[in-house]
Image (cartoon, rainbow, N blue to C red):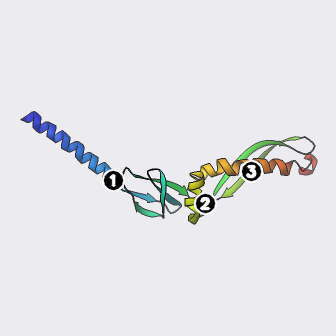
């Protein structure tokens, strides 16, 4: 009987820990500088404002997107119109509009991917185009 009681206690303990884990994963918090994107089975379901939010455990997950102003930096080498090499530093400051977070997530899955896939190529190309219009002497 003692072995059966011990097995029962172990099973009840495992069930209790599982229930605690499921219940504790029902809520999430979003910081004031973020917006949440609630994903149900990986698909965009809704957005979440700052504060306490609730989700269905095991079905929902939450991706947090910063709406703070962020500055991204690039270091690159390019050439002037007279073919003089120059090392340049460029930066872009941007932020995600809180009311556009769902669209941002739908298209890019986050701010870092937006910068990597959309902003980075434009910055690199435009810096080369603009710098390439001037001679090295004129730039200095």
Q: Residue at x 68, y 57 (%)?
A: 93
In the rendering, which numbered label is found on residue 24? 1
- The image quarter containing residue 12 is top left
How far apart, in angstroms, are the residues tagged by discs 3 and 2? Answer: 18 Å
Residue at image point 65% right, 50% down? 115
Specify few, some or many for label 3: CA neighbours under 10 Å numbering under 14, 14-19, or 20 or more. few
9 horizontally vs 101: left or right:
left
Q: What residue do we see at 51% from left, 55% from top?
A: 64
Determine whether 87 is above or below 109 in the image.
above
> In the image, residue 129 lies at what x, y percent?
84, 49
Query: How many angstroms separate mark 1 from mark 2 (CA)?
Result: 30 Å
- Secondary structure under the numbered disc 1 in the rendered image: helix
Per the rendering, the mark at residue 96 is 2
User: Residue 15: x, y in percent?
Assistant: 23, 45
Q: Is residue 140 visible?
A: no
Which residue is farthest left?
1
Q: Nearer the viewer, residue 133 or 42?
A: 42
- In the image, taking residue 136 as reference, residue 30 lies left or right, namely left
Provide residue 89's location: percent of width, then percent of height.
76, 47
**Badge 1 vs badge 2, beta-carbon distance below 8 Å:** no
Q: Mark 1 or mark 3, which is nearer the start of the sequence? A: 1
* Inter-mark Cα distance, 3 to 1: 43 Å
SS at mark 2 in the image? loop
Numbered badge on residue 122 = 3
Q: Tag 1: Cα neighbours inside 10 Å, few (<14), some, or many (≥20)?
A: few
Q: Decide: few, some or many residues near mark 2? Use Cα within 10 Å; few <14, some 14-19, many ≥20.
A: some
């Amino acid at each position: 009987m003692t072995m059966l009681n011990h097995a029962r206690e172990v099973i009840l303990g495992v069930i209790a820990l599982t229930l605690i884990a499921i219940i504790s994963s029902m809520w999430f918090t979003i910081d004031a500088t973020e917006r949440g994107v609630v994903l149900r089975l990986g698909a965009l379901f809704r957005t979440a404002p700052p504060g306490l939010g609730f989700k269905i455990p095991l079905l929902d997950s939450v991706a947090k997107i910063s709406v703070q102003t962020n500055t991204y930096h690039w270091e690159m080498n390019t050439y002037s119109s007279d073919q003089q090499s120059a090392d340049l530093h460029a930066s872009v400051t941007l932020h995600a509009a809180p009311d556009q977070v769902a669209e941002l997530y739908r298209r890019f899955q986050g701010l870092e991917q937006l910068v990597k896939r959309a902003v980075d190529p434009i910055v690199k190309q435009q810096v080369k185009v603009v710098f390439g219009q001037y001679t090295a002497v004129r730039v200095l």
